[in-house]
Image: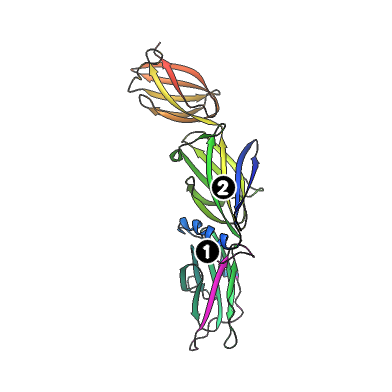
Amino acid sequence: MSPFRILCRQPASSLAAMVVLTAMTGSALAQGVQGFASNPDDDLHLPNLNNFAPTSPGPETGLSTRSVVMEAVLGEDGEPVQQGLTWRVFQPIPGTDGKLPLLASSEGGSTSFDLSPGDYFIHVSFGRAGVTKKLSIPRTGPVEKQRLVLNAGGLVLNAVSGNGVRIVPSELSFKIYQANGESPDFEQQLVLDDVKPNTIVRLNAGTYHIVSDYGDNNAVIRSDIRVETGKLTEAVIQHRAAELTLKLVSEEGGEAIADTAWSILTSGGDVVSETVGAFPRIVLAEGQYTAIARNKNQTYSRDFDVVAGHNADVEVLLK
């Protein structure tokens, strides 16, 4: 079946994010999810497997091993994921360090392990998405194929300024948090930091709180985005900000004067940026500001407005 696309808007307070969902089923899903493998699994946090209580002392030693085939799907009706998976098999009894011993691992798509009869925990991860299942291998009789449902999707983030003005990717970064409507303390729920634009992030299905930083000052937008099972969510955050070039000049349109120290104040008098240079470039959220330039023990100032999406020069005159 061919991919289909749904266009919608998800508000975050008075702001909005444009969201495109690309849903794939059948063979198209198995091919489409290969793109999710672009993210490494570094800093992966496994679930607390010790919460599971084993029903037997664990694997029996001295017995012939039995082959167990394992596959993972994004959703109940999905086809097996062909790459980007990491499989881990754990003993059910914690070691002296309180952790479950890792017995075997595998990377790629579907896999198989030769294990002795007994109980195990198997965990499969797909980027930041993952699921754990208890496995019991009998001494005799058939060994069923293990099919784990990840309930996962992908998320791609980008941003524009004003009415669709493109932002240079190097000026953008995103943080992804697990959304929690009951707590504003997003720092305690960080999923992934410093996500670059157009990067596919693999996540469990659910709602995530996205923080988009444009530049290094006050251009920050928050938005809640929902990731759906078996779908690639492409979210474009709308910033209300602009990029400015500061110049101290002797006349309008004149040469920028070097060795100038700059301070940018909000209309309330708060300092939002300090820099030094002949023509520094800064990003500011929409609003009213005052630019203060210091050169050779002299101070000059100018009030100016920032309009979303309108990148401009801010000239301060020597007078």
Q: Residue 35 magenta-drawn?
A: no
Residue holding disc 1: 125
**Disc 1 on helix, strand or loop?**
strand
**Disc 2 on helix, strand or loop?**
strand
Find the distance from the CA under tag 2 to the CA under tag 1. Answer: 22 Å
Q: Position of residue 215 (x, y in %)?
A: 47, 36
Identified by mark 1, the residue type is Ser
Direction from residue 136 to residue 217 in the image, left or right:
left
Residue holding disc 2: 234
Give the farthest residue toward the right: 182
Q: Position of residue 4 (x, y in %)?
A: 62, 52
* Quadrant of the frame with the N terminus: bottom right
Of mark 2 and mark 1, the one earlier in the sequence is 1
Q: Position of residue 266 (x, y in %)?
A: 53, 25
Residue found at x 64% / y 42%: 9
| Residues packed near mark 2 inside 10 Å, few (<14), some (14 to 19) or many (20 plus) | many
Residue found at x 60% / y 87%: 141
Q: Which residues are magenta?
A: 52-80
Residue found at x 53% / y 31%: 241
| Residues packed near mark 1 inside 10 Å, few (<14), some (14 to 19) or many (20 plus) | many
